[in-house]
Image: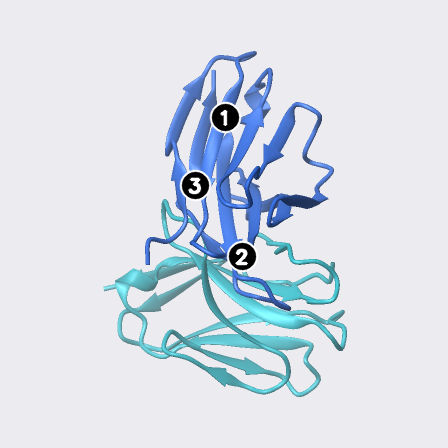
Chain colours: A blue, B cyan
């Protein structure tokens, strides 16, 4: 059981640069989620995939953010023209499917925008 | 999304039971009560969930009030490894799959 993995674990970038994060879900999990967490707060939902289809997006996901899951396996989250307010922990989770199924989280990618 | 209310922080001694409360007075009939926890520098981790009846698993027990307006997560013997933020989340499986986290309860365990 390899669990959910995320890469990189840490990313430091300058304001205005683009960044891309990768999430590898647990094998055969058809649902994949992205959350964002700022210091002292609980995670906030960003978006959700069922296989390769992006089924729900939060209002937090501005047009600078884009997420893909091209083959229904791994997913990428790209942030264009980063801003200091984008500094946060980006968490990925996956779940097997079914009503109210349990989500399994990865360790997160910590983004710092200077 | 129905709201939950949890204390900001709690403290426990090692090897003693811990009762973490959660109020959810606006819970609907189809909302499940989920608990996740987040250890330092890690992603959240599923603990337990229930609908109406009390639930037990290897990690914890969940006691649900008869009117379902509150619940309590019970750690039977706290260890230092249980120090984490504990989140109580209401989830209606008919209305999407996202988790809506509040601020949670910071549990500190003293040795």
Q: Quadrant of the N terminus of chain B?
A: bottom right
**Chain assignment, label 2:** B
Query: Residue tagged by mark 2?
Result: B104
Residue A105 on image: x %, y %: 46, 52
Q: Is there a contact, CB below 8 Å, between mark 3 and mark 1? A: no
Q: Between label 2 and label 3, give the one nearer the viewer.
A: 3
How far, Cα to Cα, is label 3 from label 1? 13 Å
- Left or right, residue B54 beside residue A49: left
Residue under the point 59% across and 76% down: B71
For the residue carrying disc 2, how many other residues have a C-alpha within 10 Å: few (<14), some (14-19), or many (20+)? Answer: many
Q: Are marks 2 and 3 on the same chain?
A: no
For the residue carrying disc 3, how many other residues have a C-alpha within 10 Å: few (<14), some (14-19), or many (20+)? Answer: many
Residue under the point 76% across and 77% down: B29
Query: Residue tagged by mark 1?
Result: A20
**Chain assignment, label 3:** A
For the residue carrying disc 1, how many other residues have a C-alpha within 10 Å: few (<14), some (14-19), or many (20+)? Answer: some
Q: Between label 3 and label 1, give the one nearer the viewer.
A: 1
Q: Quadrant of the C terminus of chain B?
A: bottom left
Tell me: residue A2, above or below residue B109: above
Residue under the point 59% across and 87% down: B53
Query: Residue A108, which numbered label?
Result: 3
**Callout 2: helix, strand or loop?**
loop
Q: Is there a contact, CB below 8 Å, between mark 2 and mark 3? A: no
Of pointers 3 and 1, the one earlier in the residue sequence: 1
How far, Cα to Cα, is label 2 from label 3? 19 Å
> Can you name the residue that lies furthest to the front here?
A71
Quadrant of residue A71 in the image?
Answer: top right
Q: Are marks 1 and 2 on the same chain?
A: no
Residue A76 on image: x %, y %: 52, 34
């Amino acid at each position: 059981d390899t669990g959910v993995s995320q890469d990189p674990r840490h990313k430091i970038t300058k304001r205005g640069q683009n960044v891309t994060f990768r999430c590898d879900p647990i094998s055969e999990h058809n649902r994949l989620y992205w959350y964002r967490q700022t210091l002292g707060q609980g995670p906030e939902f960003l978006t959700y995939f069922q296989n390769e289809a992006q089924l729900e997006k939060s209002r937090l996901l501005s047009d600078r953010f884009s997420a893909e899951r091209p083959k229904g396996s791994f997913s990428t989250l790209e942030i264009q023209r980063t801003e200091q307010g984008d500094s946060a922990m980006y968490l990925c989770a996956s779940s097997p499917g079914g009503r109210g199924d349990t989500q399994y989280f990865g360790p997160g990618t910590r983004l710092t925008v200077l | 999304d129905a709201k939950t209310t949890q204390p900001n922080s709690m403290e426990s001694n090692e090897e003693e039971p811990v009762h973490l409360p959660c109020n959810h007075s606006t819970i609907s009939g189809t909302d499940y009560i989920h608990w996740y926890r987040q250890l330092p520098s890690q992603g959240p981790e599923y603990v337990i969930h229930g609908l109406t009846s009390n639930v037990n698993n290897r990690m914890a027990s969940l006691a649900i009030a008869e009117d379902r307006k509150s619940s309590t997560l019970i750690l039977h013997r706290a260890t230092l490894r249980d120090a984490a933020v504990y989140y109580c989340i209401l989830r209606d499986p008919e209305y999407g799959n996202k988790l809506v986290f509040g601020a949670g309860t910071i549990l500190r365990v003293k040795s």
